[in-house]
Structures are given as structure tokens and as C-alpha cells.
Image: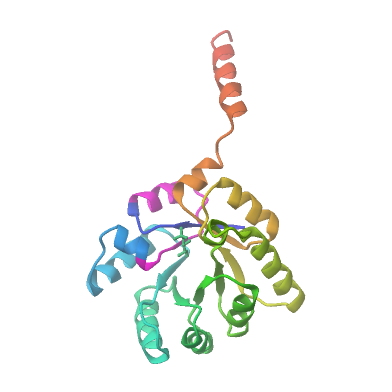
Amino acid sequence: MKFFIDTANLAQIKEANDLGILDGVTTNPSLMAKEGIKGADNITNHYKTICDIVDGDISAEVLSTTFEEIIEEGKKLAAIHPNIVVKVPMIKDGVKAIKWFTDNKIKTNCTLIFSAGQAILAAKAGATYVSPFLGRIDDSGWDGVQLIEQIAQIFAVQGFKTEILAASIRNANHIIRCAEAGADVCTCPLDSILALLKHPLTDIGLAKFLEDAKKM
Ligand code: E4P
């Protein structure tokens, strides 16, 4: 399973990249706004900087919602760097745009996936990735990991090449359960990645080893 970091924060992207386990980055308008990135030039420069830090797929989301505008915006985003993946919302014009990008060899990430039916449509259109938002599904009282399992089973049976990018990850357990469920990628906040490191028995064991090492 690939690891992406789900943030537009450069310090966090560098920290995850320095760990040596990072395969890519996902951003969205909320994450960009959180970092105070405003205006076309600043947005473009921010994506360039991220591409300079991480050698992997970098999702940049379109803000348009009509076919023609999504295509225009997506072409500009894709021109920023070869690693840019155009993130397109799961709407009718978005599906149509994903097909156009696929035919024109531009990678896509279909975002805001909340059902298996949406994932099937995006895969049929040739999306490189589908992003089921499992944390938001859990927040509303359903089981997000179950959706990952269902999509993984459908894609395997149907032979879809689209990768399942588990998004809206809230904790380390989500990451582990997504790995088990067959997600191809998990996009995670830095604290969820770092939480994978932690086990109290590791801390106790290391303290004891270091203590005993003094007697060596
Ligand atoms: C990533 O591609 C998604 O935009 C992101 O994971 C959404 O996460 P959230 O539900 O925490 O906003």
C-alpha cells in the first residue's frame, strides 16, 4: 500500500517525506485555505513547491464544476508538473471530464466518493484514483472501511485498473484497516502516520535495553 500525506502544509510534507515512506500528497481547497494560499499564482507556486519536495503523485483539485471549465482548469494544473494528478469531484460533469483527461493521458483522482456506485462510474471513466472518504462516512454513523472492502472486491472482480485511495483518514487504526481491506493508497494526516510508530511496549522495551546497555 502506498502512503500519501493529506495536507498542504509544507513542514508536514517535508517531515513525512524525510521518513522515507512517502509516495505522494493530496490537497483540497479546504487544506489549501488552511495554509492561507490565495490567488492563482500562489496556488501554482505552492503546487510547484510540493512537487519539488515529494517525488510522487500530487493531487491538485479543480474548483470548477462544469465540463469545459474543469477541462481548462485541469489542463493548467497538469501543466505545472508531470507529477500533478487532477482531482475532480464526483459529479456528472466531473465523470465526463475524467474520461476526457483519461483519453488525453492526464492522471485523475475522483474525489468525494461515498458509494460503490460512484466508484464504479469513476473507474469506468478511467480515473487513476478514486477517493472514498471513510472518516466522513464513519462520522455520519456508517462504516467507511466496509466501503473500501466493497470497492476493492468490485474492482478485483471487474479487473478495473483504478487505484483505491482511502481518504479522510482520522487515525492509525483507519490506516491498518484500509491496508487489510485492500486499499492501494492511504492518504493520511501526519499525526495518523506518526501514530503507527507508537506502542507502549516498544517504549518500555527500549527504556530497559538502554538501561541494561549501561551495564555492558
Ligand atoms: C483527500 O483527498 C480528501 O480531500 C481528504 O482526505 C478529506 O479529509 P477530511 O474528511 O478530513 O476533510
Looking at this rendering, what residue extends furthest in the top direction? 215
Q: Where's the C terminus, which quadrant?
A: top right
Q: Position of residue 107 (x, y in %)?
A: 50, 77
Which of 23 and 68 lies nearest the eye of the viewer?
68
On whether residue 28 falls in the magenta region, the answer is yes
Q: Residue furthest right?
A: 157
Residue nearest the viewer, comparing 115 with 98: 115
Q: How is the image coloured?
A: rainbow
Q: Residue furthest toward the front?
A: 141
- At x 26%, y 64%, the residue is 37
Say if 110 sits above or below 135 in the image.
below
The magenta span reads: 11-29
* Near-viewer residue (16 or 61): 61
Percent x, y for residue 115?
Answer: 61, 72
Q: Say which quadrant the N terminus sits in.
A: bottom right
Q: Residue 56's x, y, as percent? A: 48, 63
Q: Quadrant of residue 79?
A: bottom left
Q: Looking at the image, which residue is at 40% across and 73% down?
A: 61
**Residue 203 on image: x %, y %:** 56, 26
Q: Is residue 189 in view? A: yes
Q: Is residue 45 rendered to the left or right of residue 60?
A: left
Residue 49 shown left or right of residue 97 in the figure: left
Residue 163 is one of the magenta-drawn residues: no
